[in-house]
Image (cartoon, coloured by chain):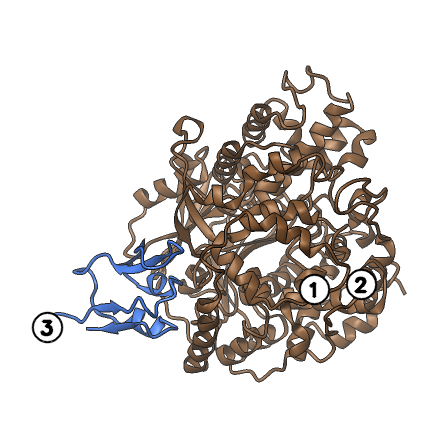
Amino acid sequence: MKGYCGKILMVDLTSSAFDEIAIPDDIYEHFLSGVGLGAYILYKYLPKGTDPLSPDNVLGFVSGLLTGTGSFMTGRWLAVCKSPLTGGFGDANCGGTFSPAIKQCGYDAIFFKGKAAKPVFLFIDNKGPRLIDALSLWGQDTVETEASIRSIVTSKKRLAIATIGPAGEHQSLIAGISNDGGRMAARSGVGAVMGSKNLKAVVLGGSKLIRTQDPDEIKEISQAYAKKVKSSNLPAITTGAILPILGKSMVATDKAIPIDGMMSTAIMKKWGTGFGNTMGMTMGDAPVKNWKGSIADFPYRKYHHMNPDLIQKHETQKYHCYSCIIGCGGVCDIKGVSKGRFSHTHKPEYETVAAFGSLLLNKDRDAIFLINELLNRGGMDSISAGNTIAFAMECYEKGWLSDEATGGLDLSWGNTAAIVTLVEQMIAAEGFGAVLQNGVKKASEILGLASAPLAMHAGGQEPGMHDPRLDPILGIHFSCDPTPGRHTIGAGSYYNYMRLWESVSWAPKVKLGEDKTEEYEANSNVGLKSMANACIKQVLDGSGGCFFAMLSGFNHFKLFDYLNAATGWNKTPNEYMTIGLRMQTLRQCFNVREGINPRDFKINKRLSGQPPLTEGPLKGKSFKMDEMMGIHYQFMGWDQKTGIPTRAALENLGFCDLEMEDISHG
Amino acid sequence: MANPKKPVIDYEICMACGICAADCPLSCLALRKKNIDSYQNAYPVLDDYYLCNGCTRCEKACPMQAIRMV
C-alpha cells in the first residue's frame, strides 16, 4: 500500500469502542480514498433508511489519497454522512491542516457511529485514540473550542482540530464543521450530524509517516507545477478596477475563448475568490435579490464596495491550506469593524460576499466581515444562510411575513442591521432565526406551500453563488449531482479551464470561437462535458485535490501522474475517469437506496430562467432543465428518465464486495 | 552528544506550502509572514531552535528541496 494507510478507524460513540478496519488495496483501486472511500463505507455500514440525525448515521472524516505524499494542492478533507438536509449522500469539503493530520494518525479516515451519552471529543496521537469529556466545551464557538482544547490536551505536535459550533450543537440542518479557526466543511448539514452524536470535536496529533511508491517522481511533478505557478502573476499595476470590465468583456460574445488555466491561478494568487465579487456582477454570475434581480438592482455604486482590493486592505497575511502553493486564503484584521467585536477573520470568500451582498442587496462591507466571522464561529454554512435570509426577505417584500412574525425585524432588502441580527438568531436558534436555522426548504415548509417558489434549493440544498442562466452546465450539476446545489462540481467554464481533452480521449475539445449558445441545449457535447466534469471531480475529491488546482488545468496540475507515482499504479487518464464514474454512480445508488427520486433534485426553476430575467447580462436567458438532466443521466449510464443507474452500468463498473441493491426499474 | 543539524530554508525556492511545518513531529516550524514577496505569504521559520532534534523529516518532506540540514 503506497500513498494510503490501508485502514480506517471506526469509533462507536455509544459503547466508546474503537475498531481498526483494514481496507483492501482493491477498494482504493476502485474508489480511491476521500469521497470514494467515504461512499464505500457509507454504502456498506449505514443501515438503509437511517434517520440522518439518529445514532445509526455514520459520520466520516476522510483524507485524500494524495494528501501527505509530497504532491501540491492535495490537502482537502471531507466530512461524509447521510445528509439531514437532502436525505441522500452528504459530504462537505474543506482545506486547512486537518487532512494530513488524519493520515499522520495512521488512518485514511475516521468514522463515527452511535451517540455519546454526553458531549465528548476524540483525541488521537501516536499512542492511539481516546474519547475525552467535552461538557465544558459545549456552547463554545469554533474558535473558542480550538483554544480550549489546546489548553486541555498536551501534545508535542501542534494539534489539528475539527469542531462544531453552537449551530451544530443545535442540529441546525445548515451547520458545518470548522477547522483552522473558521475554515468550514459547510455543506450537506454535516455539522448537525456531528451535533446529533454529541461529538464536539476531533483532535489529531499523530506524526506517522506517509509512504509513497516513487517520492522522487512526485517531487519532480511538484517542482514543474510550482515553476508554472510561481511565474503566473498579474502585472503589478493590476487593480480590482479592471474586474468589472473583464467580467463585461467575457460575456460580450457568445463565442468560446478557451483561456489557459494558469490565468485563473494568477488571479487567485492576487485576490483569492474575491475577484468574483465585482466581476461576477457584470458577468451576471453573481445572484441578485434572491436570484430574481440583476445588476440594475445592485449597480456599481453599491457593488463597488465589494472590490477585492478594499477587502485586501484588511489582509495581514495570506493563508495557505496544507500543500497549497497558490494561497487564495487570507487572514484579515477586523479590529476596526463593529466596534472591534472580533480581532481577525479568514478573508471572506466570494460565496459569502455574494450571499450576504448582492443576494440581499446589502452594500455594507464591514457587516460582511462581521457576518463572516459570526458564521465561522457559529459553525454555519454561509451559502445556505444567505439563501435562506434572501427567501425571508422576498416573503417579507410580498407581505407574507408580518413584523410580528419576524419578531419586529424589518426584513427590507439591504437592511444590514436586521441581517446581522438574523444571522445571530439563526446560530443561536432563537427568535425568527429559529424558523430559518434549518435552511430554505424547511423554512418554506413552515411558512406554507405558497412560499415554495421563492425557496431556492435543489433537493433541500441551497445553491452556490453562481448563476446557471450564465452557464447551464452548472445548472446540470446543481440538479444532477448526488449532493445537489453545489457550485464546485462542474460548469462549462470550468471545463474550458481544465483542458481534459489533452489527456482524456473522449473529452470533447473546446475550440476557439465555438458557439457557447449550444450549451443551452441538451445535446451530446453538453452530455459529454457534464459527464467529464462529474467524473473528474470525483477523482479530485478522492485524491484530496483542490478545486482551484483543477481550474489551473490538468495540463499543468498533473493529477493522474501524481496518483500513479504515489501508488505505483499505471492507470491511464481514461481509467481514472472510469473510477470517477464508479464513485459518482455509487453515490447516486446510495441516494436511490435511501428512497430519493433523482428528478426531485431539480433546482428551483427560477435558476433555469423560467421565467427569464428582464434586465441585466442574463436578460432572456433560459434553458430546459428537465432535458438537460436527461442528457446528463444518459451519458452517465443512468436511466434518462429517472436518473437511476442502469443495471448494465452497474455490471460494467463493478463495485467490489459491496452488495448492490437492485435499484433498477427495468 | 553532538548538536543536531537544524533546517535552513532557502526562501528563493520555498513555495510556502506548509508541508514541512505539518510534517514536523515536534512542530518546531511555524508559518510567518516574511515580507519577501508581494503576496504577504507566510513562510516556515524554525520557531524553536532548541526543540528541533534534527530528525530531517522536514528536509525529506519538502517537495521543492528547499531545506538543508546544517
Going 72% across and 58% down the picture, which residue do you hit? A590
Is the C-beta separation of discs 1 and 2 under 8 Å?
yes
Q: Colour of chain B?
A: blue
Q: Earlier in the sequence, mark 1 or mark 2?
A: 1
Would you say residue A62 is visible in this rendering?
no
Quadrant of the rendering where the C terminus of chain A is positioned: bottom right
| Vertical placement of residue B16 versus A483, above or below | below
At mark 2, the secondary structure is helix
Quadrant assignment, res A126: bottom left
CA gap between label 3 and label 2 equals: 65 Å
The reply, left or right, for residue A588 in relation to residue A166 is right
Q: Position of residue B51 (x, y in %)?
A: 19, 60
Q: Give the drawing colour for chain A.
A: brown
Residue labelled with disc 3: B2
Q: Whole-percent x and y of residue A665?
A: 88, 62
Q: Which residue is mark 1?
A: A534
Residue B5 makes an appearance in the image: yes
Q: Amino acid at mark 2?
A: His
Q: Nearer the viewer, residue A495 or A427?
A: A495
Labels 3 and 1 within one chain: no
> Which residue position holds label 2?
A632
Comparing labels 3 and 1, the label whose residue is closer to the camera:
1
Q: CA distance from mark 1 to mark 2?
A: 10 Å
User: Alpha-carbon neighbours of circle 3 within 10 Å: few (<14), some, or many (≥20)?
Assistant: few
Please name the amino acid that badge 1 sits on: Ala
Label 2 near label 3: C-beta < 8 Å?
no
Q: Chain of mark 1?
A: A
Find the distance from the CA under tag 3 to the CA under tag 1: 56 Å
Q: Quadrant of residue B14?
A: bottom left
Front-lying residue, A8 or A572: A572
